[in-house]
Image: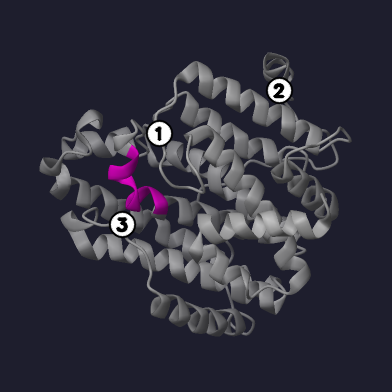
Amino acid sequence: MTQDDLLGHAERSIAVGSKSFAAASRLFDPGTRRSAVLLYAWCRHCDDVIDGQEAGHGAVVIEQAEAQRRLAELRRQTDVALSAGQLDDPAFAALREVARRHDFAPQEPFDLLEGFDQDVRAQRYQTLDDLLGYCYHVAGVVGLMMARVMGVRDAAVLDRACDLGLAMQLTNIARDIVEDAAVSRCYVPEQWLQREGIAADQMDSPAQRQALARVAEALVAAAEPYYASAEAGLAALPWRSAWAVATAAQVYRGIGLKVRARGSRAWDTRCSTSKGEKLLAVATGLWRALSARWRRHPPRDSALWQRPQHDASKGRPGAPEAALAAAR
């Protein structure tokens, strides 16, 4: 597959899978955009394989044994992509190019797959901190890898990039509570469900909408300090990257605010942003990216959830040899 073919595959993936990220990615300089889109294509592919969906749509329930087999195969192919083996799938060829070009920490792609493992095991989360651990695996680490694509190596700035991933995932969870419940997925902290008297197997019941709206409002509120923390990292990015990131943050934060404003009707139709709202987010993102350069930002709040630290100089810990063997 040529470089043009590889980029074409990734462009098609992002165009169908995420209109919000597709719009924001146009603001990157060409080199950064290529790497960001290639990374997206690999993340999208892995998510689709585990959820039995296409381009992020139409998730179905997959038998656990089959889901485990798929996950093991994703781990095997990722391991090959990060080494020198033969690749046939464009999604993993995309990962190889990006990981080599931007010196990914060896563990980070596997941290994403650990999040999918938690999905396969139908893991539940007792507290918000437990949930944030999951959010790190499926979104925070994507923020880390995207930041590396933009040239970030400073650990404090990587923390801010992770914070944006956490905020976006909390927003996604609030928006998709009912949709996730329909395929037997629950990401709301158990403590919150108990407080509202909601049974996990009744979350998609119309009778629970008022209580569910309070849960969604709490998720949106929990995302806010992470959006604020992420904004402080904009000043360390190249200005076009800062513009793209600020725009994406504006779009996602707006979705969360819509969920909160709709209350019990938040899941009557899927919350999304219109073309006009995306254009406004582009303009607002430019202002936030530029103004971040002359504003003073406080140190990151020590009360915020802290990502795990990996030593990039060492091989990835916990290599999934057993999982790789199972896939062969």
Q: Secondary structure at mark 2?
A: loop
Discs 2/3, front: 3
The image position of residue 327, as x and y in percent, is 68, 18
Say whether disc 1 or disc 2 marks the residue closer to the N-terminus: 1
Within the image, what quadrant is residue 269 found in? Answer: bottom left
Q: Residues within 10 Å of mark 2 (few under 14, many from 20)?
A: some
Residue 69 makes an appearance in the image: yes
Q: 46 or 105, which is in the foreground?
A: 46
Q: What amino acid is found at the position of numbered circle 1 in the picture?
A: Val
Residue 232 makes an appearance in the image: no
Q: Is residue 111 above or below residue 11?
A: above
Identify the disc placed on residue 320.
2
The image position of residue 154, as x and y in percent, is 75, 59
Q: Residues within 10 Å of mark 1 (few under 14, many from 20)?
A: some
Q: What amino acid is found at the position of numbered circle 3 in the picture?
A: Arg
Are dots 1 and 2 in contact, CB under 8 Å?
Answer: no
